Amino acid sequence: MLTLDLTNAPRWHDLAPGVRVQLRPLTTALMVATRSDASVEATPEDASDEERAVAFAKALARRSVIAWDGVGDADGNAIDPSPEAIDALLDIWPIFEAFQLTYVSKGLLLEQEKNASALSPTGPSAGASATAKPVRKPARTARRG
């Protein structure tokens, strides 16, 4: 069952011990805006899937990160999110992976889920289970009289 969250409120996501980010909900508008982001569109056509994933994740993070805890500069002073700081945060492999798993993949899993359906019980894939029990004896026909 698909559960709708009608509050559409930002949520905190833990990305590493002591590091968490507050993110906007992963909405259709946010995904569409990210797909048309200049940095995503500037990705070369011959770029690998991994390079495209990094470009998309950074563009999405720049649009979705509202606040964070546990992120600081080289001197250990807390800093606010900025496009450059968000990109630098996602350059840290475990942070990138956590962002992908806790935020991006939830939207993608839902996308995959809607494309799945049971096999057709009458088509060439005939994979759905039968719901009727087999008949034990042939039915008797009524006498004509």
Image (cartoon, grey):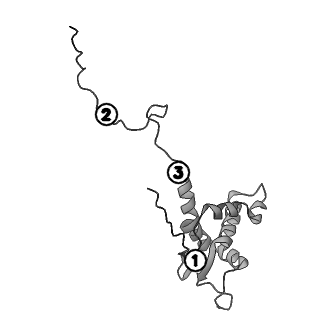
Within the image, what quadrant is residue 100 found in?
Answer: bottom right
Q: Which mark is first along the chain, 3 or 1? A: 1
Mark 1 residue crowding within 10 angstroms, few (<14) / some (14–19) / many (20+): some
Q: Is residue 28 above or below residue 61?
A: above
Q: Quadrant of the C terminus?
A: top left
Q: Is residue 4 above or below residue 117?
A: below
Q: Which mark is residue 49?
A: none
Q: Amino acid at mark 2?
A: Ala
In the image: residue 121, left or right of residue 64: left
Residue at 69 percent across and 63 percent down: it is 33
Expressed as whole percent of the image width and height from the top left, the position of residue 11 reads 53, 74
In the image: residue 112, left or right of residue 130: right
For the residues marked 1 and 3, what is the alpha-carbon distance in whole angstroms?
27 Å
Residue at 58 percent across and 77 percent down: it is 21
Q: Nearer the viewer, residue 30 or 116?
A: 30
Q: Secondary structure at mark 2?
A: loop
Expressed as whole percent of the image width and height from the top left, the position of residue 97 reads 59, 68
Q: Amino acid at mark 3?
A: Lys
Q: Amino acid at mark 1?
A: Gln
Q: Which residue is mark 3?
A: 114
Q: Which residue is mark 1?
A: 22
Q: Which mark is first along the chain, 2 or 3? A: 3
Give the number of marks: 3
For the residues marked 3 and 2, what is the alpha-carbon distance in whole angstroms?
28 Å
